[in-house]
Image (tube, helix red, strand yellow):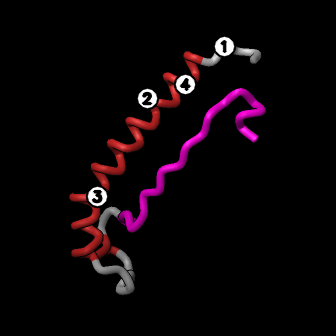
Amino acid sequence: MLQLLNGTSELITAADTYQFDDYFKYEASMFDVKHKAEVKEKQFPMDCQKALEMGGRLVKAMRETPLGN
């Protein structure tokens, strides 16, 4: 559908992220705070890098595609 609108799309999934800034302020015992902190420290920066790279690809694709075609 987006190709018809002269565009490209991609998807990035960032899962198991923080729901709260401070888990101790909420009754959220279903979450493993230590695990969430590890994911935030290790995986989240990689997800952000992937998003940055995707943005670069989308901008490049947009610049290479003449408007109206």
Q: Is 59 left or right of 37, judged from the image as shown?
A: right
Q: Which mark is residue 66?
A: 1
Q: Which residues are magenta?
A: 1-20
Q: Is 58 left or right of 15, judged from the image as shown?
A: right
Quarter location, residue 19: bottom left
Q: Earlier in the sequence, mark 4 or mark 2?
A: 2
Q: Which residue is mark 3?
A: 43
What residue type is disc 2 on? Answer: Gly
C-alpha span from label 2 to label 3: 20 Å
Q: Are marks 3 and 4 in contact (CB under 8 Å)?
A: no
Is residue 2 covered in magenta? yes
- In the figure, 1 relative to 67: above or below? below
The residue positioned 49% from the left and 22% from the top of the image is 60
C-alpha span from label 4 to label 2: 9 Å
Quarter that holds the N terminus: top right
Q: Which mark is residue 61?
A: 4
C-alpha span from label 1 to label 2: 17 Å
SS category of the residue bearing label 2 = helix
What residue type is disc 1 on? Answer: Pro
Q: Which residue is mark 2?
A: 56
Number of other residues with Cα within 10 Å of mark 1, as a class: few under 14, some 14 to 19, many 20 or more: few
Q: Earlier in the sequence, mark 4 or mark 1?
A: 4
- In the figure, 3 relative to 21: above or below? above
- In the figure, 36 relative to 69: above or below? below
Q: Is 54 left or right of 48, judged from the image as shown?
A: right
